[in-house]
Amino acid sequence: MENSNTISSKVLKTEPIKWRELSFVQDENFKEWIGKGDEKLQQSLLKYQFIDPFKVWFDGVHIFCLDGKHRYLDLINLLESGVDVPEELPATFIDCRDMKEAAELVLIYSSQYAKITQRGLFQFVEKFQLNLDNMPEMNLPNFKLDELPLNEPTDLTAPKLDNPPVIKITFVNQRQMELFEKHLQEISECYPDMKYSISLGEL
C-alpha cells in the first residue's frame, strides 16, 4: 500500500454477521496467548460482553477476519461450554484492494504504536478510583499489578513517610553519577512516589 497525502475512510459499514462462518488471513501459529490471556479474554467477554466489532474484509465470496481471531476462538470455547452466544455479532467492513492489502492490515491491527507507562497507569487508576482486584480479566503483561503502590501518600510529610527508607550511593566521580542518573529516571517511572536527589561531596 502506497502512502498518500490525503486521508479517506476505508470503513464501508458495520453490520451483524454470522461470525462462526468467518475466514482468516493468518495461519494458526501467527499469534500465541500471553500467559493466561486465553482465560482472561474469556472472563473479559463474560464481564464486559462483546464491545468491539470484528474488523473484516469481504472478497466477494468469503468474509475474512482482519482483527478479532482470538475473540472468535474464545467465543467458540464459551459457546461449547454452554454460554449463550448470539448467532450474529457486529463486524466493521474494511475496503481492501486484494488479499495482500488485507494481510498488511492484519499486521497493522496487530501493531502497537503506544504503550501505557507505569506512572500513567498509577495516575489513571487513582483518577477514576479503579479497583484492579475487581479486574482480574485485565491483561497487562509488562506490569506487576500486585506491586502497584496505589493509594500511598506521596507527601514526604505524611505520617507514614515521617521516616522514609533511604538509600545513599557514593560515586567515584561525577561522570559515574551522571550515567546513573539516567537509570534513576527509568526507575522513577516504575515507582512514581519515589523521591530522590543528587548532590556532590557528601558521604
Image (cartoon, rainbow, N blue to C red):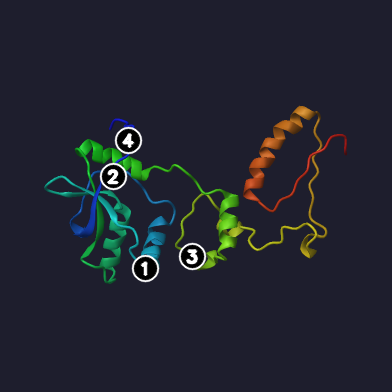
| Tag 4–tag 3 contact (CB < 8 Å) | no
Any mark on residue 135, and which? 3
**For discs 2 and 3, the disc positioned in front in the rendered view:** 2
- In this view of the protein, which residue sits in the foreground, 203 or 130? 130
Any mark on residue 9, and which? 2
Point 26% across, 67% down: residue: 79
Q: Quadrant of the N terminus?
A: top left
**At label 3, which amino acid type do we have?**
Met
Could you tell whether 20 is left or right of 203 in the image? left
Could you tell whether 8 is left or right of 147 in the image? left
Q: Quadrant of the C terminus?
A: top right
Which residue in the protein does label 4 denote?
6
- The Cα–Cα distance between marks 1 and 2, rounded to whole angstroms, is 32 Å
**At label 1, which amino acid type do we have?**
Leu
- The Cα–Cα distance between marks 1 and 4, rounded to whole angstroms, is 40 Å
The first of marks 4 and 3 along the sequence is 4
**At label 2, which amino acid type do we have?**
Ser
Point 38% across, 51% down: residue: 33
Any mark on residue 46, and which? 1
**For discs 4 and 3, the disc positioned in front in the rendered view:** 4
| Tag 1–tag 2 contact (CB < 8 Å) | no
Classify 10 Å Cα crowding around label 4: few (below 14), some (14-19), many (20 and above). Answer: few
The first of marks 1 and 3 along the sequence is 1
Label 3: element kind? loop
Classify 10 Å Cα crowding around label 1: few (below 14), some (14-19), many (20 and above). Answer: some
**At label 4, which amino acid type do we have?**
Thr
